[in-house]
Amino acid sequence: MSFRIKLMKNKGRLYAAIVEETYNPLIKRSSGKTIRTYGDLNKRRLTEPDIDERIQADLAELRANADLAERLKAQTLKDQVATCAPNNKPDCAGIYNYGIALYRRLWERLGLDVWFKQYRRNHRLKFDFDLAAFFLAALRILAPCSKKRTHEYRGNFVFDFSSLTQADLYETLGLLSGSKDVLIRNVNKGIADIYERTMTVALYDCTTFYFESFDSDELRARGMSKENRTNEVQVVMGLLVDADGIPLDYELFRGNTSEIKTLLQVVRKHKVNSGLGKVTVVADRGLNCKLNLQHLAEEGFDYIVAQSISRLKKDVKERVLSEENWEHSERFHEDVFKMKRLDARADPERDAGIIVTWSLKRHHHDLDVLEELWTKGKELVAKGASAVETSMKHGSRQFLKSKKGKKGEYEVNTSLYEKRKKQAGFYVIATSNKDASPQEIFANLRRLWRVEECFRVLKSNLDARPVFVWTPEHIRGHFLVCYLALVLERLSCHLIRMKGIRDISPHKLVELMRQQNVTVLSGRARSTPISLRLGHDGSTPERKNADIASADAVMQIFGIAPVNMMEAYPDLKNKLACRLPFAAREATGGIIRRSRG
């Protein structure tokens, strides 16, 4: 590598520039790269008599200062990309995403590529089943949208998805719907091969996903919506995750299914599929019913569930609300936390113990909520019977009751208000696990936020709803794609945390992967295309940029070497190291955008 002054004549004018001469073994010849230009030399000599000496001094400085040369090359490349993109619009520059490689590497570590390819061979499919399934799952993370819009994005990556048709994507949904159990079993096996998974605790909850439709069928139906969608049809999903928040299994139910009826089916099915041993199932109070807990015990599971104080027997309730016999008490800043274990049973017919906790912070919160509902209840009474009868029964209406002997007249329920006031700050847990300490049991129950986080990711980040497919097979296939995307998203974040990187949130990780783009520089002097790494806005980044360093560190965890600012296209393929077809790119294309389609 060397620098020299290059003089060029054009239309009678003399132009000067400093160029870098580099031998390229790919094309087996030297090529010049402009580092700094000086414009019309004769014109500048008239206004700057010492311009020749300055050019010589710049040349000497470049030869002596490698950092300066790198900065000038970066600026030159940035200007070159801007020239390729009229009006500075990155769509016109041929921008291709390679951040998708992180999810592909994880997909291959889970062994999913092997499973899908084997399925294709066994069923003699004409299209690439592995390519289609991965494309749907990865796009659900990077650019969640309709299947039609997903198909339109297939040309926006360094990998070649061009062979996929829209019909292939819909056929993939149908094939997935019949392969759920065996596929999830293989996913869990792949996770166990990657790291030692904690399987002593399984967290369960359920939620609803709505459709932009009012038509019912074997899956879609109106029911109790968790999102206040009272008119649209929906499906119910029961989700089981491990203690780290990595999904274990799920099941879809018809939209009018009660959440209480979902727990046993999901747990039993997962036990059969995975051969689980003794596991403690953790669930919220909405799933706490006598039949559920009885069957869990019969199946050999321990359980930890939140318990309603009002459903306890009178003598047990008095002991729960007593200020005596606290076994553990500690103070956190402005909060006070107490805990005790009662030798009483939560239910006479169940061998379940009771853990009681009380928090000063929760006490203040419960009182605030109670006072708000109490105030609204009194306002309803003041407005009259019609306002009371049109209100929601589970809100402030619960603190109202009919006046004795006066039909259509209401009054506030002072006794209920006083009972709730005494219960403020208390939290009761029913558990069959007698070996674990109260602190461990309470900690496991608090892990339920991990299931709620999975639902939040599904609904917000992955846009799993509203659902636009409508046949039962496509609906099941859509949710299996969302489940696979959720596994990739949750597992990638967990593996990154295991490596000690804790300053990258799940949202930040996806944004970083969306920003990993290259453009392809091609021209008469190049027989091999050169990829130029870009920033998130289509501009060439500085190598010391924090996002670039973070992206490189994260991708190395998954076996992807850092991509240089300029990279021969074949070298880029080798660095990504994915078993996917690599596209032969020209300087055309588009940047991925998130869209609902």
Image (cartoon, rainbow, N blue to C red):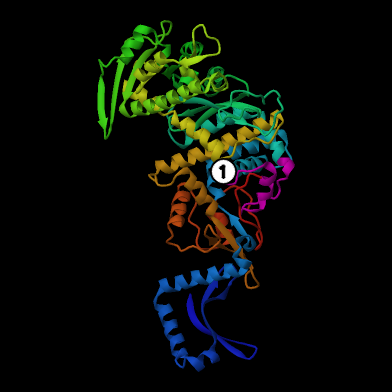
Q: Is residue 374 left or right of residue 147?
A: left
Q: Residue at x 43, y 78 (%)?
A: 62
User: What is the magenta range?
Assistant: 142-168
Q: Is residue 213 visible?
A: yes
| Depth order, front residue of 4/446 | 446
Counting from the top left corner in percent of width and height, residue 514 is at 54, 51
What kind of residue is marked 1?
Ile
- The residue that label 1 is drawn on is 141
Residue 47 higher or lower than 280, as above or below: below
Image position, residue 108 (x, y; %): 55, 42
Residue at image point 65% right, 28% down: 231
44 shown above or below 306? below
Choose between 32 and 8: the one closer to the eye: 8
The residue at the point 66 percent across, 58 percent down is 589
Depth check, front residue: 42 or 138: 42
| 211 is higher (above) or lower (below) than 10 | above
Residue 403 in percent (x, y) is at 49, 10
- The answer to whether residue 154 is magenta is yes
x and y percent of residue 120 in the render?
Answer: 68, 37
